[in-house]
Image (cartoon, rainbow, N blue to C red):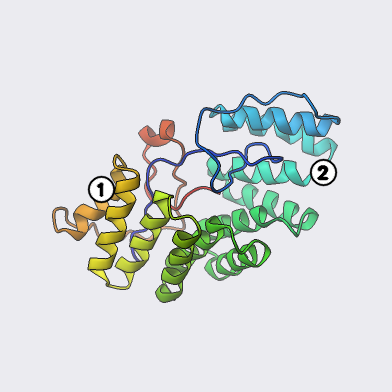
Amino acid sequence: MTDVETPAANRPRVAPGAPGLAAPGAPAGPPQQIGSEGLTTPTEIGVARAAALFERVDPAAAAQHLDPVLAADPQSAAGWILLARIRLVLDEVDKALDAANRAIDLAPEDARPLAMASRALTLLGRHEEAVTMAYRAIIVEPKNPLWHDRVAWSLLAADRQYADAEQAARTAVGLDPKEAHFYFTHGVTLDALGHTDQARQAFLVSLKLEPENPVAQHRLAVLNGEVIREPEKKKRGWKLFGRKSDAASGPSRPEEYRP
């Protein structure tokens, strides 16, 4: 299996109406200050406060705050979606999958928990299910490049259908041609197919958009023969590449952009 990696800069992006959840195309910036204005129920206020803690890079505190909120109101799809993302960041993969599945039952029309379930399944080594969940996310929201990116990484992790992974990555680039990470994913899939020159071009575009990304720099150096490709290490799954402040802890096998 190719040594799938991701750019180090996973910028948290907040989707309107869903505190703490990423949305493609949303501008990067400092964490939003989420208050209780406009929120009418204890659940909405609790979810918003947990999202604020999460955006301040304190996922453990966010989970601690959110657990009793969901215990009091287990019908909050927004709460379960946020908790799934928090659990993924904490590398509590089984709990993340459980939260995502709860959200899927409550909001089957929302692609985000499908993608998060897919990611958790990949981390658990349940690759067939991960691929299926990723494609379900695309069916729900076909114009969202993040879900096509998730398909690409789920297929790469499954060690199969690299051509389909490349097509998914190329679709993500077409949907958001200004996002460096999607070119990075495309480069990884092209490398897996043995298309070295095309992979090099994809990494160069990724670095043009995000010049200081060390992982993309490293992958390009490998293709250029400047760095020896390390032998593959088989693992159950990969740790998530967190925010920049998490980089010092050194995730051993970072994966794709965090949904």
The residue that appears at 30% across and 48% down in the rendered structure is 207
Spot occupied by residue 244 in the image (x, y as percentages of width and height): 41, 34
Residue type marked 2: Pro
Asked if disc 2 and disc 1 are in contact, CB closer than 8 Å, the reply is: no
Horizontal side of 77 relative to 165 (left or right) equals right
Residue type marked 1: Gln
Name the quarter where the N terminus is drawn: bottom left
Indicate the secondary structure of the residue bearing disc 2: loop
- Classify 119 as above or below 31: below
Q: Is residue 81 visible?
A: yes
The residue that appears at 64% across and 28% down in the rendered structure is 52
Marks 2 and 1 sit apart, C-alpha to C-alpha, by 44 Å
The residue that appears at 39% across and 50% down in the rendered structure is 180
Residue farthest to the left, as pictured: 226
The numbered mark at residue 97 is: none
Classify residue 182 by image quadrant.
bottom left
- The residue singled out by tag 2 in the image is 74
The residue that appears at 68% across and 52% down in the rendered structure is 100
The numbered mark at residue 217 is: 1
Spot occupied by residue 11 in the image (x, y as percentages of width and height): 47, 39
Spot occupied by residue 2 in the image (x, y as percentages of width and height): 34, 64
Q: How crowded is mark 2: few (under 14 residues within 10 Å), some or many (20 or more)?
A: some
Q: Residues within 10 Å of mark 1 (few under 14, many from 20)?
A: some
Instruction: Please state which of the two labelled residues, at mark 2 or mark 1, is closer to the viewer.
Output: 1
Nearest the viewer among 170 and 249 is: 170
Indicate the secondary structure of the residue bearing disc 1: helix
Q: Is residue 90 visible?
A: no
Horizontal side of 112 relative to 183 (left or right) equals right
Spot occupied by residue 251 in the image (x, y as percentages of width and height): 39, 43
- Classify 216 as above or below 233: above
